[in-house]
Amino acid sequence: MENYHILFLGGASASPPSITMANHQRYLQGNDVITTTTKVESKCENLDVIAKDVVSESQELKAGKKGDNKVMRKHKYAFQTRSQVDILDDGYRWRKYGQKTVKNSKFPRSYYRCTHKECNVKKQVQRNSKDNEIVVTTYEGIHTHPVEKFTENFEHILRQMQTFNHL
DNA sequence: CGGGTTTGACCTGCGC
DNA sequence: GCGCAGGTCAAACCCG
């Protein structure tokens, strides 16, 4: 079993965005997953970069839509894993619909959509050019259906992510 | 044949 | 308005 970390960043609805992290290996063993922000910071040197991205997005949403509380929330989560494989088995089926090279990154970014009918959840997968063992995954949207293939791996953490975002 | 991937073209938002 | 960068489309292709 590979030893890699999951970084989970709270989306636009959190104020300020909360950051939690799971040790994926422990997670796979079925133990408690989510640790606290403070623990993350000492373990993950790339935390700041991604955290800033999410914060700025959150602020943009607020700034652009202030005064309108009927706005659809944009559910967007980013986390990174330390892994040799790009594609994590998170229990959902994904169809790749694009790939782009990104500036200042030697690795391309891949674009995926959930294959379930009427479910337009998207995700992006990109390898960190500074540390090519790190894979950054960004999810956007909430699945309108249960996981199609039950894998203990991610069902739990995805549920946590969604619950968190609805607070 | 059905479903997924590849890949260049196209679209769009943003900074200058 | 222009050009760049990122995101998406879709035709061709691949594979069980």
Image (cartoon, coloured by chain):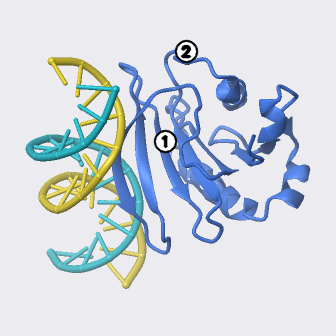
Chain colours: A blue, B yellow, C cyan
Question: In the shown orientation, is residue B11 left or right of residue A160?
Answer: left
Examine the rendered structure and indicate whether residue A52 appears above or below residue A93: below
Examine the rendered structure and indicate whether residue A72 appears above or below residue B7: above
Badge 1 amino acid: Lys
Q: Are marks 2 and 1 in contact (CB under 8 Å)?
A: no
Q: What is the distance, in whole Å, between disc 2 and disc 1 at their CAs?
A: 17 Å
The quadrant the C terminus of chain A occupies is top right
Please report the residue visible at 77 percent of the width from the left and 31 percent of the height from the top: A28
Please report the residue visible at 43 percent of the width from the left and 51 percent of the height from the top: A110
Of the image marks 2 and 1, the number of the one nearer the N terminus = 1
Badge 2 amino acid: Pro
Identify the image quadrant of residue A99: bottom left
Residues A22 and A9: in front is A22
How far from the left and from the top, in percent, is residue A92? 52, 26
Write down the chain letter for disc 2: A
Write down the chain letter for disc 1: A
Task: Tell me the tag on residue A123.
Answer: 1
Please report the residue visible at 51 percent of the width from the left and 24 percent of the height from the top: A143
Question: In the shown orientation, is residue C12 left or right of residue A108?
Answer: left
Task: Tell me the tag on residue A146.
Answer: 2
Question: In the shown orientation, is residue A56 left or right of residue A18?
Answer: left
Examine the rendered structure and indicate whether residue A114 appears above or below residue A104: above
The quadrant the N terminus of chain A occupies is top right
Residues A76 and A158: in front is A158
Question: Which element carries disc 1, helix, strand or loop?
Answer: strand
